[in-house]
Image: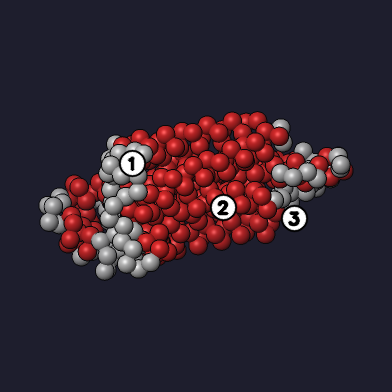
Amino acid sequence: MTSLAAHAAPTPARTRPIAIANWLLAVGFLVFCMVVVGGITRLTESGLSITEWKPITGAIPPLSLSGWEAEFAKYKATPEYQVINGPAGMTLAQFQFIFFWEWLHRLLGRLIGIAFALPLAYFWLRGAIPREYKLRLVALLALGGLQGAIGWWMVVSGLTLRTDVSHYRLAVHLLTALFILSGLVWTALDLRQLAKGNARPAKLTGRNIALLAIIAVQLLLGAWVAGMDAGYIASDWPLMNGRFFPAGVDWSHGLLYAASNDPFLVYFLHRWWAFVALAAVILLARGARRAGVRPASIILSAAIGLQILLGIATAMSGVDLALAAAHQAVGAILVASAVWAAHAAGRRNLIEGVPA
């Protein structure tokens, strides 16, 4: 058994691991806010209200009536308006409501880019970043830029032939955001350990990779449910419209196609895979507790319990906006706390050489 002291190493005097860790956690909070606003954007069907990608000038919303009318005219050319909102008699005020949520979502993306890039440049020029973390931080910056492109790639899928965005692209967009959040949390935790003299970063074990993958499957299914509006299919629980297994599943293209495209089957899988994810979370929480990081275990356990209750309540409410938004918010907290727990177990495994 190797002691913690054996892995301790002094850090260069100019590096500032705690300051960098705090900055990364602050950016992580902004990513969390963006995930929540993204969920509201989807729930309010706001994502297609801005039909152009203008990274710089798009930060300013229309400031005059003529400007609003011009934006509304562009939206009127989309299938979503022509098939759904136009026949329903959408007014300019209603358009402004959905425009606001998409604009806020994009604005948060811009703020996150600035909040990451400028401090990164500052810390880099001051020599405050430990050498072994420079590549990781640059990779996170690049991933953030890619996320912006993925967001537009998602929006484009709903501007011509569809009345909504592709649920596949929506899933890529959401999972990339949660992966970025995970990377920010993991790196911040490594830097906090570095500040204590523990120079070796935590390692993900095969066991914990598998447990996190189980959670990722549930997140993927949840993104597909949102993308296909499958949550509106049934408002009872545990049954779906009075049946355990839903009627109406289209098997004509085979099992794999149905499992990723049929809203009845995807919603059924999302409901019940949640309990497989629950088992994975329990194991992660136990690993964190054995590593002596009880806060991670407690928060993770509370998050999964609340998440399941919110999921049931969202279903039974007919997808109430507040409940559904809370469901996505707690999902992001669950991801961050699962990463925290896996990191704690990885530290224990690294230091003591025991299974995590």
Q: Nearer the viewer, residue 53 or 326?
A: 326
- Report the amino acid beneath label 3: Arg
Q: CA distance from mark 1 to mark 2?
A: 27 Å
Check disc 3 and report its element: helix, strand or loop: helix
Residue 98: percent from left, percent from top:
27, 49
Does the image show residue 73? no
Does the image show residue 138? yes
Residue 332: percent from left, percent from top:
49, 43
Q: CA distance from mark 3 to mark 2?
A: 30 Å
Q: Quadrant of residue 321?
A: top left
- Report the amino acid beneath label 1: Leu
Give the residue at mark 3: 131
> In the image, which is nearer the foreground, mark 3 or mark 2?
2
Q: Which quadrant, please, contains the C terminus? A: top right
Mark 1 or 3 closer to N-term?
3
Q: Which mark is residue 213?
A: 2
- Relative horizontal placement of residue 143, taking residue 166 as reference (left or right): right
Q: Which mark is residue 239?
A: 1
Mark 1 or 2 closer to N-term?
2
Q: How is the image coloured?
A: secondary structure
Check disc 2 and report its element: helix, strand or loop: helix
Q: Which mark is residue 9?
A: none
Tag 2: Cα neighbours inside 10 Å, few (<14), some, or many (≥20)?
Answer: some
Q: Quadrant of residue 74?
A: bottom left
Q: Nearer the viewer, residue 84 or 212?
A: 212
- Relative horizontal placement of residue 126, taking residue 48 as reference (left or right): right
